[in-house]
């Protein structure tokens, strides 16, 4: 039997000021190594810091020329005050003058296939994704996913603070929630199953139990085309809430959760913001434009006629954002009342105009980041709508139970993490905001 002492402080955080002029021992990996005539600057990457260390050739047990970037080291040295400008280094007030280096592990190749020490990687997307275990070590790549992590944490934190309950729904399912052909089929012990396109059915069922719920999890879309906006697996940030008066209640919650995320990023990611040279937005006004009005504005202002189309063209999404920025000084546009034929069966129709739904998309910097809206909540409404659409209601009986047993008026939304992250970080392709993107041509790494 071995009994371990319970360690209380596992955060890896160091108060460098309290070590000034004193010896410290830390472990990390070599982010960058610059060998000079007198010694070297070595940037060490730890779970919390990238910190500059200085090697004096005459006062070290290992010569810097023999070290390889990405090696794991345990170093000993004296903490000194410093003024560091390099944005790739997040500890800019202190450096360490190394007195001893212990190489714990080193790469097994002589030279790394991609130089992660350059300011920008400057390699094509395929190479970047092929070598993800290495290319993600680049400070700018890491910064993207630090921001994505804050988005998830704050989505959860804010919604929890207003009494939403976190849920986790199954990803292997009996029927698709979103319709369309972009669904992956599985052989599930001789019956047909699917990979969940969204947690839609489950989050609705859970409203009957907890009233307000949210989920952060992967969803799967068998997108047949390789585009800069689509992934075949992405992280969906979902919430669903009961007792709503209208879908505008959902828009209010989304506005607050997004502003809370933006302010958290500003508070905790100043290094990442600096490194990526980005400005974090804020929703200062809630601008809602009806779907038909968008077509009309695009026609009147940009002379493009999409007025008979039942969905927004990506060009329209871009143009309406440009228009809103100039006219209302906002980067966020809620487009409401989408045509019923383009929304899934669970979307509630507008009683004043049944061809339109009480639903919305949120557009940000030219791209749709959210779909949401009010749902049907009466069993009969579901049966009638599904019959009208020629759907087999028996296939959905387990989902429909909740409506049979009584549900409050409710609604919610799905927010694509990679789309939000890529828009915040100014990335041209949503795949760059996925650690290990999946598209029609990619299943590895
Ligand atoms: P929808 O299908 O519009 O709605 O998806 C919601 C949000 O998910 C993101 N998204 C994607 N991101 C990357 N790759 C894709 N292939 C992809 N498809 C969608 C977008 C989109 O706005 N159940 C509804 C949501 C709801 O009403 O609650 C749904 O899934 O950001």
Image (cartoon, rainbow, N blue to C red):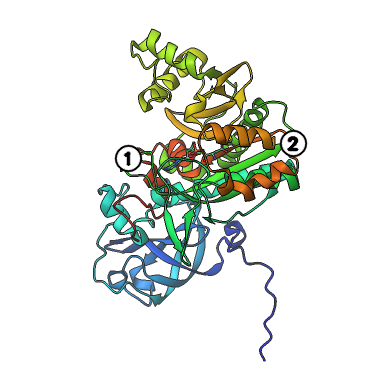
* Circles 1, 2 touching at the beta carbon (< 8 Å): no
Residue extending farthest to the bottom is 1
**Is residue 13 or residue 318 the one in the foreground?**
318
Provide the residue designation for mark 2.
Answer: 408
**Is residue 111 or residue 414 the one in the foreground?**
414
In this image, 95 relative to 119: left or right? right
Please state the horizontal and vertical placement of residue 195, each as a whole percent of the image. 47, 54
**Is residue 387 or residue 274 the one in the foreground?**
387
Residue extending farthest to the top is 300
Of marks 1 and 2, the one in the foreground: 2
Count the numbered circles shown. Answer: 2
The circle drawn on residue 32 is: none
Please state the horizontal and vertical placement of residue 119, each as a whole percent of the image. 32, 47
The residue drawn where x is 56% and y is 66% is: 22
Quadrant of the frame with the N terminus: bottom right
**Is residue 161 or residue 175 the one in the foreground?**
175
Q: In this view, does 298 lie above or below 368?
A: above
The residue drawn where x is 24% and y is 71% is: 110
The residue drawn where x is 38% and y is 11% is: 299
The residue drawn where x is 69% and y is 86% is: 3
Snapshot quadrant of residue 372? top right
Please state the horizontal and vertical placement of residue 139, each as a whole percent of the image. 40, 52
Please state the horizontal and vertical placement of residue 146, each as a whole percent of the image. 50, 50
Q: In this view of the protein, can residue 157 be seen by the observer?
A: no
Alpha carbon distance from label 1 to label 2 = 38 Å
Task: Label 2: state its secondary structure.
Answer: loop
Task: Label 1: state its secondary structure.
Answer: loop
Provide the residue designation for mark 1.
Answer: 227
């Amino acid at each position: 039997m071995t009994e371990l002492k319970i360690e209380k402080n596992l955060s890896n955080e160091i108060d460098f000021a309290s070590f000034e002029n004193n010896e410290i021992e830390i472990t990390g990996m070599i982010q960058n190594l610059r060998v000079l005539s007198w010694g070297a600057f070595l940037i060490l990457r730890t779970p919390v810091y990238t910190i500059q260390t200085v090697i004096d050739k005459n006062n070290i047990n290992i010569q810097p020329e023999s070290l390889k970037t990405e090696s794991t080291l345990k170093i000993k040295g004296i903490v000194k005050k410093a003024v560091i400008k390099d944005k790739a280094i997040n500890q800019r007030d202190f450096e360490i003058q190394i007195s001893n280096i212990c190489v714990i592990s080193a790469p097994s190749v002589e030279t790394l296939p991609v130089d992660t020490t350059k300011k920008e990687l400057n390699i094509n997307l395929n190479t970047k994704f092929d070598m993800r275990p290495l290319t993600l070590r680049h400070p700018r790549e890491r910064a993207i996913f630090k921001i994505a992590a804050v988005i998830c944490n704050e989505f959860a934190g804010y919604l929890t603070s207003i009494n939403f309950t976190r849920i986790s729904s199954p990803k292997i399912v009996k029927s698709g929630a979103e319709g369309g052909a972009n669904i992956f089929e599985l052989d599930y012990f001789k019956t047909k199953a699917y990979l969940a396109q969204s947690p839609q059915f489950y989050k609705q069922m859970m409203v009957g139990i907890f009233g307000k719920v949210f989920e952060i999890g992967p969803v799967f879309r068998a997108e047949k085309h390789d585009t800069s906006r689509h992934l075949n697996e992405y992280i969906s940030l979902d919430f669903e809430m009961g007792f709503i008066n209208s879908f505008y209640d959902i828009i209010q919650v989304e506005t607050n959760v997004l502003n809370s995320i933006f302010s958290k990023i500003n508070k905790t990611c100043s290094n990442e913001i600096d490194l990526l040279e980005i400005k974090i937005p804020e929703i200062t006004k809630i601008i809602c434009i009806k779907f038909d009005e968008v077509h009309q504005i695009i026609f009147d202002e940009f002379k493009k006629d999409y007025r008979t189309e039942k969905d927004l063209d990506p060009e329209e999404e871009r143009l309406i954002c440009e228009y809103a920025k100039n006219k209302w000084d906002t980067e966020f546009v809620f487009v409401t009342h989408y045509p019923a034929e383009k929304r899934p069966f669970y979307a509630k129709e507008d009683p004043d105009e049944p061809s339109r739904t009480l639903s919305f998309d949120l557009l940000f910097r030219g791209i749709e980041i959210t779909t949401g809206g009010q749902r049907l909540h009466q069993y009969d409404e579901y049966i009638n709508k599904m019959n009208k659409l020629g759907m087999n209601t028996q296939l959905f009986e387990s989902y429909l139970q909740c409506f049979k047993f009584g549900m409050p008026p409710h609604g919610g939304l799905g927010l694509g993490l990679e789309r939000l992250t890529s828009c915040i970080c100014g990335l041209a392709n949503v795949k760059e905001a996925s650690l290990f993107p999946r598209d029609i041509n990619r299943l590895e790494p």
